[in-house]
Amino acid sequence: MDNISICITLKDRADYLDMHLHNLQHQNYDLKKVEICIADGGSSDNLKKVIEAWYKKFHQIKFAFCDRAALPFKIASNCPACDRNSMICNMASFEKVIVTDPEVLLTNRDQLQSVDLDLNNKILMLHHRCIRFAENVKYNYKANFYSLNKHNTIGRVFNFGGFCLAFNKSEFIRNGGFDERYALGFAGEDSYFVWWWKNNRKTQFGKYLVGHLWHPSPSLNPSYQKLRREYTLPLHSRLKAENAYPNGDNPDWQRPEMIKELKIWKS
């Protein structure tokens, strides 16, 4: 088993983080080889209490305020491209990295072990198929593991997107990270990330699904829909047509200036 950094961006998602960390307890993996990195957008909930409750289970938990005001441009919606780049490049301690969201759950006890083994191929990037939970489904802390079945999930399996990505940090940096031009629009940064790596490096689906706990979708916001239609989709088409290297003309994309108030919880 190698060390793994699990990187999460969030704001006011303490309840989901608590579920996510509980979900990890069921892995057939030495969690003392796992660090949790959290890039926070300025939460006002009980996030730090959740960290205090869980950090001793892991190698450590790193927390930092990810300051979007430090950027030379304004993020138009809630695109996490810059936050993720900054966190992965400047907070992750280990070579093997999983980047995900607090509302995402692993669905098999051997999932971390599978990711670890797959990432022995340095150029490989894993992206995981994802299925969403129904709105009325509540996380069950008493269950040995949170199973997926037709009674607690809705809709189709999502094959693409950034629900749970895994790669080697050195390759992420070499390949230019998430293209921060998407930060001026709505979403799309994860789609291009997967597309580019698939067409220029090597990708495969993770062995197991991930589950996504329900929350209201920001894609229903009319202003975000307009932004996506008028900016993001044309950008996406252009970058794909050019097979554009992510952040190719942008030497500043790693954004260390965003990381503020770094704190480490370690037993």
Image (tube, helix red, strand yellow):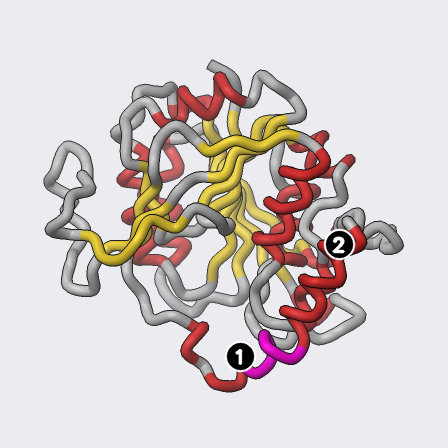
At x 47% / y 59%, what residue is drawn?
10
Which part of the image, by quadrant, shows the C terminus? top left
- Total labels drawn: 2
Judged left or right of residue 267, residue 138 is left
In the image, 134: left or right of 97? Answer: left
Q: Position of residue 263 (x, y in %)?
A: 56, 47
Stretch of the chain drawn in magenta: 224-230
Question: Which mark is nearer the camera, 2 or 1?
Answer: 1
Amino acid type, label 1? Tyr
Residue 81: x %, y % from top left: 63, 57
Of all residues, the one furthest to the top in this rendering is: 1
The residue that label 1 is drawn on is 224
Residue named by callout 2 = 255
Instruction: Classify mark 1: residues with Cα within 10 Å, few (<14), some (14-19) or many (20+).
Output: some
Tell me if residue 62 comes above or below residue 124 in the rendering: below
Work out whether residue 94 can be spotted: no
Instruction: Determine if the magenta segment contains residue 228.
Output: yes
Residue 223 seen in this snapshot: yes
Alpha-carbon span between mark 2 and mark 1: 25 Å
Judge left or right: residue 194 versus residue 147: right
Give the residue drawn at x 20%, y 64%.
135
Q: Is residue 220 magenta?
A: no
Amino acid at circle 2: Arg
Identify the main secondary structure in magenta. helix
Residue situated in front as seen by the camera: 163 or 4: 163
Element type where label 1 sits in the image:
helix
Residue plotted at (52% across, 67% down): 42
Does 110 sit above or below residue 128? above
Q: Nearer the viewer, residue 211 or 39?
A: 211
